[in-house]
Image (cartoon, rainbow, N blue to C red):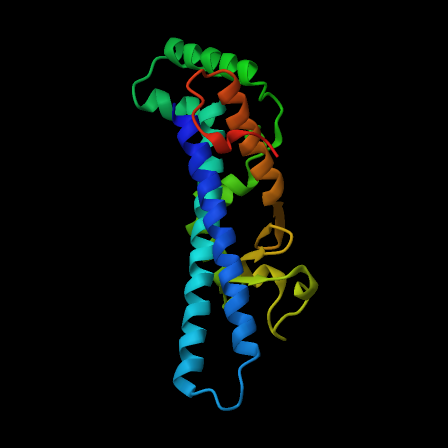
């Protein structure tokens, strides 16, 4: 079942991101504690490793968010936009109504109606991801400058370059609180993780195959 695969991929991505987070922290501590006698080449290698872990961190956070967005798409059929797209592809209204009824039955069976991450009206972050290019071009047109992404701890969240505001950052990941900020809008990844684990648990409870041992909620 596609929902199972997406849920497991989401958790996998988040776990890899967490691993990169700790690797980056350890490397940063090593860099900050370097002795004056450390060779310049060694320092440069540490900087490169920190940068590589930072990219891994963001890559897997993005994978987690993409999986969450796709779960939402599979569970909820937008009555207007999705139905119109299906009709353009030649799907009849009767068939679309049948699909909607089946999705309603799935949501009811898994007790997902009204669940935050999976509620179709809660589409803001999903729209950011789907229309990334528009967000990027709009930001560039508005500011003339753009900082793609960064990571930070909540204690340093307010620290900025003198000419950079929060919205100038396309994406920020606050590592200690698992908060994701997209152009100033804050999203709680811990809540999204909780919802994904709830989904996997609900699927497991209704599936004798017991898809994943990690599906149980915290």
Q: x and y percent of residue 91 in the render?
A: 33, 16
Residue at the image position 49 percent from the left and 21 percent from the top:
203
Q: x and y percent of residue 73 in the render?
A: 46, 29
Most foreground residue, 9 or 188 = 9
Give the farthest residue toward the bottom.
37
Q: Is residue 9 left or right of residue 115?
A: left
How many numbered badges does the structure rendering display?
0
Residue at the image position 49 percent from the left and 36 percent from the top:
68
Q: Is residue 170 above or below residue 46?
A: above
Q: Is residue 188 left or right of residue 136?
A: right
Can you say which quadrant of the picture contains the C terminus? top right
Most foreground residue, 171 or 215 = 215
Could one spot residue 131 in this view of the protein? no
Q: Is residue 22 above or below residue 45?
A: above
Q: Residue 209 lies in what quarter of the image?
A: top left
Q: Residue 117 lies in what quarter of the image?
A: top right
Most foreground residue, 175 or 115 = 175
Q: x and y percent of residue 49 in the render?
A: 42, 69
Can you say which quadrant of the picture contains the N terminus? top left
Q: Is residue 133 above or below residue 44?
A: above
Could one spot residue 45 in this view of the protein? yes
Residue at the image position 47 percent from the left and 55 percent from the top:
58
Residue at the image position 51 percent from the left and 27 percent from the top:
200
Q: x and y percent of residue 207 in the render?
A: 46, 17
Most foreground residue, 184 or 71 = 71
């Amino acid at each position: 079942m596609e929902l199972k695969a997406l849920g497991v991929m989401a958790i996998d991505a988040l776990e890899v991101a967490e691993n990169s987070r700790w690797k980056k922290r350890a490397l940063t501590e090593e860099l900050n504690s370097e002795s004056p006698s450390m060779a310049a080449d060694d320092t440069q290698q540490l900087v490169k490793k920190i940068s590589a872990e930072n990219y891994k961190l963001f890559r897997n956070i993005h994978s987690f968010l993409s999986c969450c967005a796709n779960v939402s798409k599979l569970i909820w059929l937008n009555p207007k936009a999705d139905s119109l797209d299906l009709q353009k592809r030649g799907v009849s209204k009767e068939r679309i109504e049948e699909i909607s009824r089946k999705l309603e039955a799935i949501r009811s069976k898994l007790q997902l109606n009204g669940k935050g991450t999976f509620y179709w009206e809660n589409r803001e972050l999903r729209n950011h991801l789907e229309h990334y290019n528009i967000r990027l071009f709009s930001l560039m047109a508005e500011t003339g400058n753009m900082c793609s992404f960064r990571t930070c701890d909540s204690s340093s969240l307010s620290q900025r370059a003198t000419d950079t505001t929060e919205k100038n950052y396309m994406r920020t990941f606050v590592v200690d609180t698992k908060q994701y900020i997209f152009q100033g809008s804050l999203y709680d990844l811990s809540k999204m993780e909780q919802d994904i684990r709830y989904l996997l648990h609900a699927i497991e409870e209704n599936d004798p195959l017991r898809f994943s041992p990690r599906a149980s909620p915290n």
